[in-house]
Amino acid sequence: MSIHSSAIIHPDSIIDESSVIGPFCIIGKGVNIGPKCKLHSNVIIKGPTSIGEGNIFYQFSSIGEDTPDKKFKGEDTKLIIGKNNIFREGVTIHRGTIQDNGTTQIGSDNLIMAYAHIAHDCVIGNNNTFANNSGLAGHVKVGNNVTLGGYTLIHQFCNIGDCSFTGMNTTITMDLPAYVKAASHPARVVGLNTVGLSRNGISEESISHLKKAYKLLYRKSLKLEEALLKIEELNNKYKDKHLLSFINSVKISSRGITR
């Protein structure tokens, strides 16, 4: 184990011997750091926090801090982080609250860029990219393969569907369906994320099906229920798992979708 002499490590923390703790880092009580992690310098991690293998933390990131939610009274909540994530400079992530499940959860293979913020009780999937200064309010759920442009802001309790995309300075106040691009303030849908779909190995056939579904939802002036019925008819015909994901991302919405 490599721990710099200037680091402050709580005796009750657990750090795998293959991990590296750089200068001026502070590791608090209840922190469990898995194998092959690296804290560059001036990183603060508070617990209870569990961190999986291969995570990298850059300077001045603050991980597992108490939430500023006024309802928080010091309850024993936690943060769980998966594998192979990169947290760049100044990233802030808060633990959960008992008003939800008590847990903030980050998946694996995410790139969280400088000064991004992930608030209490958020649930983040895998292979996402959050650009500089993007901010998630409490209780936000983000799927997989999502890209948030710089300075994207997401309202609490919103769902962000798989492989969706937001442009710079986008303000999301309603749910964003899977595979959709949004931009502007307030957010407006600007198309299907065809570039992201191709990069994630989704076939041209599935992309064609999703284009048809997108047009029904956003271009035909149909009521939401009417559009969903027609999209489900498409899925009955094509039996496409990506089309089903698109449908489900609309159906689970509790705030209404960005439309």
Image (cartoon, rainbow, N blue to C red):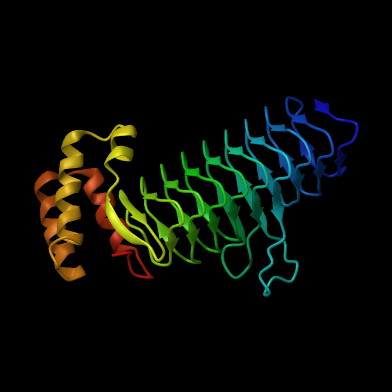
Image quadrant in which you'd find residue 36: top right
- Residue 6 in percent (x, y) is at 90, 35
Q: Quadrant of the C terminus?
A: bottom left
At x 30%, y 58%, the residue is 189
Q: Residue furthest right?
A: 5
Q: Is residue 241 above or below residue 140?
A: above
Answer with left or right where residue 259 lies relative to residue 107.
left
Q: Position of residue 45 (x, y in %)?
A: 74, 47
Query: Image point 14% across, 63% down: which residue?
Result: 229
The picture quadrant where one finds residue 258 is bottom left
Q: Is 92 located above or below residue 218 in the figure?
A: above
Name the foreground residue: 131 vs 139: 131
| Extreme residue toward the bottom, this view | 71
171 or 175: which is nearer to us? 171
Depth check: give the residue in front, 50 or 186.
Answer: 186
Residue 63 appears at what percent x and percent y? Answer: 69, 49
Q: Which image quadrant: the N terminus?
A: top right
Q: Is residue 59 above or below residue 223?
A: above
Residue, x 37% and y 53% (percent of image)? 161
Who's the residue at 45% across and 51% down the image?
A: 168
Left or right of residue 33: residue 201: left
Q: Position of residue 126 (x, y in %)?
A: 47, 41
